[in-house]
């Protein structure tokens, strides 16, 4: 059997049929061709596939697509409109050389997006920022440029 | 289209859920947050006849703060539990903040953590330390079962957890030993509780040792603690970590009692 | 680290911030087929039978292929590091008759959907007859050890011996002799993107296009051509964005060859995306090396002699890299030091584990760990400052180029100046004193250092031949100026995050005095890009690849000036190229922009005699020598004595990689390498049980460093250009990972003090388990019923 899912992805209504064990990451990449969400470990550890579901960060490899019935899903492709200037987070990561191979970058961008939204409501303590950054693995940069980019980003956003 | 795909059920009521459980005779997977279940389904596609999604079942995400106990619906996420329980069980909120990471806590549920029997988890250890009960839905309706008894019997679904409120004057402490600052799997963790009468208990877990209550101590006696950790049969380094977690949980307890 | 304010290091890397990186798994075509592997669950066994019937009957399955089926279609793959007398496995992509490690591919299923392929693969049943398992080097070398290969006399791939000077006399006359066995455990390179291959049949040339995540497209093409007996021109290898490599993608894999075979056989497009659990056992591992070291020292700390035994575990087969890491380690054994009498023996053995290949550092971190730990113990015995014993033995600049007895050439460098710079930046004396003070108060605080040499700019071709590398060491660049004046560089180098494309663009832009935006780098395509002898490995992209770009761009410049001389009607020797135009040297008013010259070159209406239309130049660069990057790492840390948990608090890293073409990229490489070095020093290990089963195939249990595990890192540097490279640049890709484990182990040794047995620091990772104060462990009763106390 298949399951029908109706949800929004980056603000656009999506209705599709999927297999019960198909994951959100499968739906995004294979059905919607949103390949900016990368798959690293398939067990929720590396964080490369992190997206926002109803505004909350989620490992798209740890959710079934069918669980997202009625949900609002945001991916890296939705961070800015085509042709629009880069978001402050995108610009900060680039300026600080906070990515090398780029494979983890989408995950970091989504975690940072969630962080920026929370920070606007109530400034996040450094410990909270640090904790959130441990949720995505990077093998290239040694993290320091990422931490530096996020620090300047949150400071500038307050 | 794969030949081995299970059915996908989205019950809306407890009655629908009970009917679903009965119809599939144990050949089902209960889907809560998905954080542990989804990778298992990927590794063994076709091993279950049905996936029963608990998300739409009424009332499973409720938190009820009663006079005697706090009831957490099975679908309450770890992130929600962290927020909601901080005023009542500050040590649990601290422990949850150390559990996995935010994207996982946003979706992982209390029920899922228990149902998939991850005894090394912070949630399981806390609930063990606080003598919590699982509230199960089965063929005969609701049943209570202590968390300490372990796995959920087949045919039952976990709908809620009931935790007794701390008694007046009770203090709590939590400590965790991590290999790395960033976290990862805890080497050891400990929850300490003390009642107004000065009776102290410590529950520890980690590195393959399931939650273990290290007896009751009239006072914080080093030797009694060391002896009770020796009885866990853990490897030497693990004993050291359990001891450190216990001592630090106790130290945090002392601080909590004495705000100065 | 301090923030930089210079221009963007990689202007073209924007795509990654947009989620527009394109990795192999993002590519594919409608109607393509999918491959899934059946992998061995046994460490060592004969395959009695394979039953593919159930799998073949699954609707949608196109082909099920076993090792025996595949054998006639594929020759054994080439060996990259091919020393005389070494033994070969002859292994193809699929095991035939016998498996030798858990995870070895046994069969492949091709189906119209990936889910179908995986389900069918699960239905393939294999009957095994278990053989005795060899899981350690000690077992492999035992006289009665079971053999992995029946036609080998033992389990040794090859052994090497290097000796110079009079080692026996050096040891006889020594004030002190320091001995130790230093172990770098098995670990996994783990790129976040696993391996991935799409092979597409190409009817137009009766060939195949293989899109793969590799560091070496030309080498993959050669492997496919040689194994499948297909001419090279029929094979095109394309490399899109690579999601990390770290050496694990530096040589061809059997899967790349097999996928090409499947595409040719089925006249279809076939895709394989490695899964993470598959990567743990199917992609090559790293390190797993033991170095037994003896140092003979004089009273003043001078190293009189060195004896080393290098023992490397290759896992189940030599693989393409074969003995390379051990041989490279032997070359680098003397590091930055003048050691007149040296004896080195290297032995490389097979065991029933996943093959080890190339991982960042490639044999050098292993010997660095041994030598720098040994020197620390020597300093302790002689009562010297650890920094001083290193300074005492450095090869001085005036002795360079210096050839070490075993053949290593130190081309250039100011080792003592570097040490001084780093010691001052770290306040070594102050930190040592503060740590001693903290220890006096009962805390376990320590500081440690390690100096290092990094062999970079892999080449020259002649040296490659001498040391058994089955490839050249040169690089080729083609530089084309388009009619608009825009410049396109075609290189065999492959970006994998390190930013080599940005460095090449910068080199070309500087040479032609244009903005870097006016240069586009084309890479990762064997059909359009220049051949490279060795691909992107051995930290050679900027030094060797960049030099070839510089030379080709220089030819373009000459041509521009020649055409401009004709256009301006002035002698060429009065003209210079400056800021994107050619002008009369002392009269900027007489000037013609590059775009006008390019247009004239392509119109060819009025070119000087003998000048061909168009602008397209090619240059080859084959270096005269390796270039030795060097530096020093200093660490302060604290150990929690109750738990053994280590808090790395401070790292200062000094390095000299010659001229820095892109300082930001250099910093990125160094810091990223240090992070992997911290992981190797304290956390990362890939253990097996006694039956040869890996103890984890999950990232939950394989502990990689995360954001908070890296302390603040201070960098200091010198720039001593290499005399052998036109652009003066040396490589830097492996720097950080080389000295960090030894520096951390030395700091741990300092923290725990003289009472601790030195052996616990001689094996990395030094896990928390080993650092708990022994008196805390002994107070637990061994028998709970009878407390000792």
Image (spheres, helix red, strand yellow):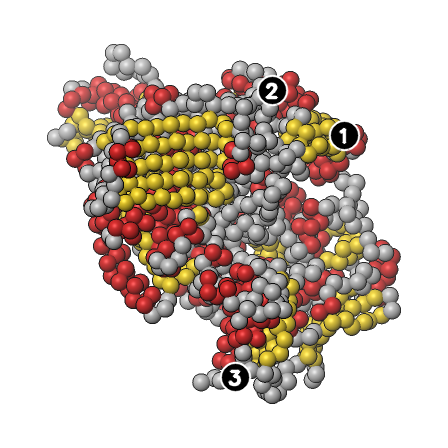
> What is the chain letter for disc 1?
C
Residue A81 higher or lower than C412, as above or below: below
Q: Nearer the viewer, residue C671 or A151?
A: C671
Circle 2 residue = C74
Which residue sits at x=64%, y=85%? B167
Please state the horizontal and vertical placement of residue C589, each as a whole percent of the image: 16, 31
Which residue sits at x=69%, y=46%? B43
Which residue sits at x=43%, y=30%? C324
Image check: B257 left or right of B69? Answer: left
Q: Secondary structure at mark 3?
A: helix
Q: CA distance from mark 3 to mark 2?
A: 73 Å
Please state the horizontal and vertical placement of residue C156, each as a whole percent of the image: 50, 28
Of tags 3 and 2, the one toward the viewer is 3
Mark toward the start of the polypeptide (2 vs 1): 1
Which residue sits at x=74%, y=72%? B146
The quadrant in which residue C549 appears is top left
Residue found farthest to the left = C586
Q: Can the viewer see residue B73?
A: no
> What is the chain letter for disc 2?
C
Numbered mark located on residue C51 in the image: 1
Q: Secondary structure at mark 2?
A: loop
């Amino acid at each position: 059997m298949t399951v029908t899912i109706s949800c929004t992805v980056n603000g656009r209504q999506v209705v599709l049929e999927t297999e019960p064990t198909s994951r959100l990451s499968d739906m995004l990449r294979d059905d919607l061709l949103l390949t900016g969400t990368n798959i690293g470990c398939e067990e929720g550890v590396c964080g490369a596939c992190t997206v926002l579901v109803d505004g909350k960060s989620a490992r798209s490899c740890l959710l079934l697509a069918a669980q997202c019935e009625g949900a609002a899903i945001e991916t890296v492709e939705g961070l800015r409109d085509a042709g629009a200037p880069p978001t402050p987070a995108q610009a900060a990561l680039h300026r600080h050389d906070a990515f090398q191979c780029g494979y983890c970058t989408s995950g970091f961008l989504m975690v940072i997006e969630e962080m920026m939204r929370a920070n606007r409501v109530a400034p996040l303590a450094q410990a909270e920022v640090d904790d959130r950054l441990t949720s995505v693995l990077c093998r290239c940069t040694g993290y320091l440029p990422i931490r530096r980019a996020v620090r300047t980003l949150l400071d500038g956003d307050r | 289209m794969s030949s081995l795909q299970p059915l996908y059920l989205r019950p809306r009521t407890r009655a629908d859920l009970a009917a679903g459980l009965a119809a599939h005779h144990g050949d089902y997977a209960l889907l809560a947050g998905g954080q542990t279940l989804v990778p298992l389904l990927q590794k063994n596609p076709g091993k279950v006849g049905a996936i029963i999604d608990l998300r739409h079942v009424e009332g499973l995400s409720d938190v009820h703060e009663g006079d005697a106990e706090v009831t957490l619906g099975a679908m309450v996420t770890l992130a929600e539990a962290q927020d909601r329980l901080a005023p009542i069980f500050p040590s649990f909120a601290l422990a949850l903040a150390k559990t996995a990471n935010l994207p996982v806590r946003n979706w992982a549920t209390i029920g899922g953590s228990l149902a998939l029997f991850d005894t090394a988890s912070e949630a399981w250890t806390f609930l063990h330390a606080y003598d919590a009960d699982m509230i199960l839905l089965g063929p005969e309706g609701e049943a209570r079962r202590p968390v300490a008894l372990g796995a959920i019997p087949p045919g039952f679904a976990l709908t809620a957890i009931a935790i007794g409120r701390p008694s007046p004057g009770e203090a709590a402490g939590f400590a965790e030993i991590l290999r790395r600052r960033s976290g990862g799997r805890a080497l050891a963790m400990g929850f300490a509780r003390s009642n107004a009468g000065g009776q102290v208990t410590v529950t520890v877990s980690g590195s393959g040792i399931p939650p273990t209550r290290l007896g009751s101590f009239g006072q914080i006696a080093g030797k009694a603690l060391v002896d009770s950790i020796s009885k866990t049969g853990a490897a030497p380094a693990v004993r050291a970590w359990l001891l450190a977690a216990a001592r630090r949980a106790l130290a945090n307890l002392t601080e909590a009692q004495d705000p100065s | 680290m301090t923030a930089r304010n210079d221009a963007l290091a990689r202007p073209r890397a924007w795509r990654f911030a947009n989620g527009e990186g394109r990795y192999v798994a993002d590519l594919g075509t409608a109607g393509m087929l999918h491959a899934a592997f059946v992998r061995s669950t046994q460490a060592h066994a004969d395959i009695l039978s394979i039953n593919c019937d159930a799998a073949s009957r699954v609707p949608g399955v196109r082909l099920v292929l076993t090792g025996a089926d595949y054998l006639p279609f594929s020759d054994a793959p080439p060996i990259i590091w091919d020393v005389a007398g070494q033994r070969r496995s002859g292994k193809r992509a699929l095991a035939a008759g016998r498996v030798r490690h858990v995870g070895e591919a046994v069969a492949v299923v091709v189906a119209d959907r990936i889910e179908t392929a995986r389900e069918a693969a699960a239905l393939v049943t294999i009957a095994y007859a278990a053989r005795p398992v060899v899981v350690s080097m000690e077992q492999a070398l035992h006289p009665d050890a079971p053999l992995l290969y029946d036609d080998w006399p033992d389990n040794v791939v090859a052994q090497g011996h290097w000796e110079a000077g009079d080692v026996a006399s050096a040891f006889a006359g020594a004030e002190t002799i320091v001995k130790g066995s230093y172990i770098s455990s098995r670990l996994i390179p783990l790129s976040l993107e696993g391996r991935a291959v799409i092979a597409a049949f190409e009817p137009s040339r009766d060939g195949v296009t293989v899109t793969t995540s590799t560091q070496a497209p030309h080498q993959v093409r050669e492997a496919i051509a040689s194994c499948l007996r297909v001419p090279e021109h029929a094979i095109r290898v394309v490399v899109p964005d690579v999601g990390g490599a770290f050496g694990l993608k530096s040589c061809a894999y059997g899967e790349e060859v097999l996928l090409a075979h499947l595409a040719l056989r089925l006249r279809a497009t076939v895709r394989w995306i490695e899964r993470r659990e598959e990567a743990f056992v199917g992609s090559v591992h790293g390190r797993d090396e033991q170095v037994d070291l003896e140092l003979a020292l004089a009273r003043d700390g001078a190293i009189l002699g060195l004896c080393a035994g290098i023992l490397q575990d290759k896992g189940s087969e030599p693989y393409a890299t074969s003995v390379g890491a051990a041989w490279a380690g032997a070359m680098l054994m003397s590091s930055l030091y003048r050691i007149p009498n040296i004896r080195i023996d290297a032995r490389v053995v097979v065991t029933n584990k996943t093959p080890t290949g190339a991982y960042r550092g490639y044999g050098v971190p292993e010997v660095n760990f041994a030598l720098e730990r040994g020197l620390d113990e020597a300093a302790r015995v002689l009562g010297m400052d650890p920094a001083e014993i290193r300074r005492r033995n450095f090869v001085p600049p005036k002795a360079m180029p210096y050839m070490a007895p075993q053949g290593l050439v130190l081309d250039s460098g100011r080792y003592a100046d570097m040490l001084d710079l780093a010691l001052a930046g770290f306040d070594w004396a102050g930190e040592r004193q503060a740590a001693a003070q903290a220890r006096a108060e009962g805390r376990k605080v320590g500081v440690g250092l390690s100096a290092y040499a990094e062999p970079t700019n892999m080449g020259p071709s002649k040296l490659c031949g001498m040391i058994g590398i089955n490839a050249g060491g040169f690089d080729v660049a083609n530089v084309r100026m388009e009619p608009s004046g825009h410049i396109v560089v075609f290189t065999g180098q492959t970006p994998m995050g390190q930013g080599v494309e940005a460095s090449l663009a910068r080199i070309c832009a500087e040479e032609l005095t244009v903005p870097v935006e006016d240069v586009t780098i084309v890479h990762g395509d064997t059909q359009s890009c220049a051949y490279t002898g060795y691909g992107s490995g051995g930290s050679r992209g900027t030094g060797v690849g960049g030099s070839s770009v510089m030379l080709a761009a220089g030819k373009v410049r000459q041509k521009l000036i020649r055409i401009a001389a004709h256009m301006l009607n002035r002698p060429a020797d009065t003209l210079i190229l400056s800021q994107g135009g050619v002008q009369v040297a002392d009269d900027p008013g007489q000037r013609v922009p590059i775009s006008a010259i390019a247009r004239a070159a392509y119109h060819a209406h009025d070119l000087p005699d003998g000048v061909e239309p168009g602008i397209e130049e090619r240059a080859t660069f084959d270096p005269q020598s390796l270039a030795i990057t060097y530096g020093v790492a200093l660490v302060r840390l604290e150990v929690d004595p109750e738990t053994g948990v280590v808090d790395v608090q401070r790292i200062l890293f000094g390095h000299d990689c010659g001229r820095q073409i892109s300082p930001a990229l250099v910093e990125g490489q160094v810091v990223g390498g240090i992070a992997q070095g911290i992981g190797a020093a304290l956390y990362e290990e890939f253990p097996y049980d006694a039956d040869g089963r890996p103890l984890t195939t999950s990232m939950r249990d394989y502990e990689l460093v995360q954001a908070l595990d890296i302390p603040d890192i201070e960098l200091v540097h010198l720039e001593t250009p290499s005399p052998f490279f036109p652009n003066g640049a040396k490589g830097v890709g492996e720097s950080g990972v080389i000295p960090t484990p030894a520096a951390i182990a030395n700091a741990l040794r300092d923290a725990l003090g003289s009472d601790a047995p030195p052996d616990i620091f001689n094996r990395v990772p030094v896990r928390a388990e080993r650092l708990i104060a022994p008196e805390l462990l002994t107070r637990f009763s061994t028998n709970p019923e009878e407390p000792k106390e």
